[in-house]
Image: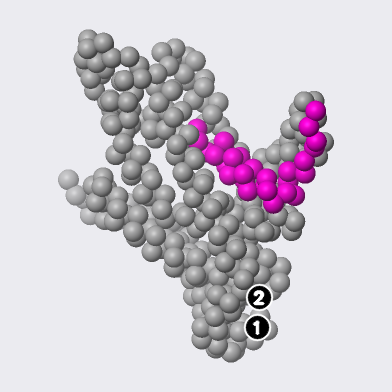
Amino acid sequence: MYNKKNARYYHAMLLPGMIFLIIFSIIPMFGIVMAFQNFIPAKGIFGSKFVGLAQFQRLFRLPDFWQILQNTLIIALSKIILGTLLAVVFAVLLNECQNVRYKRFIQTAVYLPHFLSWVILAVMFSNIFSYTGIINQLIMAFGGEPTMFMISNTWFRPIIIGTDVWKEFGYNAVIYVAAMTGIDPTLYEAADIDGAGRWKKILHITLPAILPTIILMGTLSIGSVLNAGFDQVFNMYSPLVYRTGDIIDTYVYREGLVNIQYSFATAVGLFKSVISFGLLAMAYKLADKFCGYRIF
C-alpha cells in the first residue's frame, strides 16, 4: 500500500545520489562548449574566442587520428569477440563439471582477476614480457632469441587484447553459467534416453538455450566499441608503440593534460561520445528486436 509519509523518506534517500550526479556528471557537461572555442584558461569559457567547428576540422585532417581510431576499433572489437567466445566456452565446460567443490574453486579462481587493478597487472605483465622476463627465458631455453615484447608494434596489440581477455572472461562467464541454470533438466534426461553424448547435448540443448543471452550480451557490447580500455593501455604503453597501441582515450589525455590543448581534446572526446551514444542506441534497438530486452 502506497504511503505518502514513507515515500518522502524514500525520496530523501535518493538525494545524495542525485546531488552527486548533478555535481560530477551534469554540471561538467557544460564544459563541452570548449570544443567550439579556442579555450585559454586565463580567459575562461566566457572570455575565450568562439571558433565553431574548427577543432573538428583539425581533428579530421590529422593523419594520426585515423590511425588512432583504427587502433581503438581493432583493440575494442577483438576484446569483445574473443572475450565473448572464451567466456561461452568456459561456461559450457564449467557446466559439464560434475565435481561441485572443484567447480566452485575453478569459478572463483578465474573470477578474481576481474577485481585486480590494471596498475597492479600492468607491472606484473611488464615483468613477465620484459627482455629478462619469464616468457623470454622460456624462448631462450628452447633456443630462440629474446624479444622486446612491450616496445614491439608487432606484439603490443596482441598482449593488450590477450591480457584483457584473461582478466575479464571469468567475470563474463558468470552470466552464461547463470543462464544455464535455467535449462530444463528433463531435456538432458530425454537426450540421455535417446543415447546422445555430451557433445550432442551441448550442441543441441545447452548452446541453443543460452543463445538469446549470447545475442543480448553481444548487442549490448556494441555501445562499448570505442572503449578500448584507457587504464590498461595507459599503464602498459610507451611512445614506441603509439603506432599500434595509441587509442582515443590516451590521445585525449595527452592532448588535453600533457600538451594543454583543452579545446582540441574536448572536441576529440565529444566526437567519441556522440558516436558511442549512437552505437548504444543501436545496441538497445537490436537487443529489443532480437531478445525483447528493454529498459524503458
**Residue 161's image quarter?**
top right
Point out the frontmost of discs 1 and 2.
2
Q: Is residue 18 magenta?
A: no
Image: 162 above or below 296: above
> Which SS does the magenta portion mostly show?
helix
- Seen at 33% across and 38% down, the residue is 213
The part of the chain drawn in magenta is 143-171
Say which element carries label 1: loop
Drawn side of residue 66 relative to residue 217, left or right: right
Mark drawn on residue 261: 2
Mark closest to the chain's N terminus, 1 or 2: 1
Label 1 to label 2: alpha-carbon separation: 9 Å
Q: Circle 1 is placed at which residue position?
A: 40
Inspect the image, locate mark 2, and give the three-letter code of the amino acid beneath it: Gln
Which part of the image, by quadrant, shows the N terminus?
top left
- Seen at 28% across and 25% down, the residue is 205
Work out whether residue 75 can be spotted: yes
Q: Position of residue 241 (x, y in %)?
A: 71, 55
